[in-house]
Image: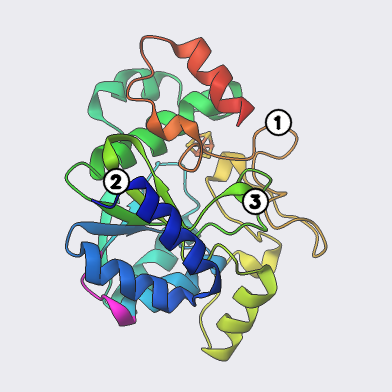
Amino acid sequence: MLSVHKIEKFSKEFETKTPQEIIEWAVDRFSPYMAMSSSFQTQSMPLLYMVAHIAPDMPVFFIDTGYHFWETLMFREKIADEWKLNIVDLYRDSRWDIFARQNTRTLPLEDPNLCCYLHKVQPMQNALKGYKAWISGIRRDQTAVRAHANFLELQGDGLLKINPLLNWTKADINNYIEEHNLPHHPLYEKGYRSVGCAPCTIAIGANDDERAGRWAGRGKVECGLHTSMFDKKDIAESKSEFLLDATKE
Ligand code: SF4
């Protein structure tokens, strides 16, 4: 694994590299112990397209929370089939099944941080065991938290998170989609600029921030995959403190 010094050095160098150059660097260094994650929304298409061409065998983690729009699931099927992606579906740990079933309707609204932890963060933590690195599509222009992200971020257990699109803007994404004639998520034209789970996503106006429709009006902007919530091992012992920390991110 890279030293902290080298991670900082490469991270600075990547400020002037293209996403494709960063992905190629990562594949050379970490494959096959590397995966990417994707939520299969419109702005995910450029990174997926790049990875499909540079490293077609790379596992693509899709977190199936059970709360997705059916349009997302159908879109994922279509893209996975056409681009021959190596999709790996991630699910909640079965030990939460009884609790989650009892609270299916209320959990996303009454405790979205706990809901995101059970359905997104913990499945991703479990899936990444044994891997050395994972590629994420976050951008600095998306949220205040992401504005401070680095191209390489060392996470718990020595896992390296790689963010090749960090410096891209919404316009860069749109230009790439147009240039390569990439498909849009079926709900995009209906105002869903950023699509997550159905209970936590609404349509927005053309001039709103890209993620304004996610957990709108609920004081939450991140699911936890890109905050300190990701490095916590278990929610059980300190739930309230844990969630308080997570919402401060
Ligand atoms: S986005 Fe909403 S429904 Fe999906 S896991 Fe998070 S709180 Fe639950």
- Rounded to the nearest angstrom, the CA distance separating label 3 from label 1 is 18 Å
Circle 3: element type = helix
Question: Which residue matches tag 1?
Answer: 219
Q: Amino acid at mark 1?
A: Gly
- Rounded to the nearest angstrom, the CA distance separating label 2 from label 3 is 27 Å
Is residue 247 rendered to the left or right of residue 171?
left
* The label number, if any, that marks residue 147 in the structure image: 3
The residue that appears at 24% across and 28% down in the rendered structure is: 94
The residue that appears at 51% across and 82% down in the rendered structure is: 182
Question: Which residue matches tag 2?
Answer: 90
**Magenta segment boundaries in residue numbering:** 53-58
Q: Amino acid at mark 2?
A: Leu
- Find residue 194 and report its horizontal and vertical position in percent: 61, 57
Is residue 129 rendered to the left or right of residue 150?
left
* Relative height, residue 79 to residue 211 (above, below): below
Q: Is residue 220 visible?
A: yes
Say which of marks 2 and 3 sits in front: 3
- Res. 174 image quadrant: bottom right
Circle 2: element type = strand
Say which of marks 1 and 2 sits in front: 1
The reply to whether the residue tagged 3 has its Cβ within 8 angstroms of ligand 1 is no
Is residue 209 rendered to the left or right of residue 73?
right
Circle nearer the N terminus (2, 3): 2
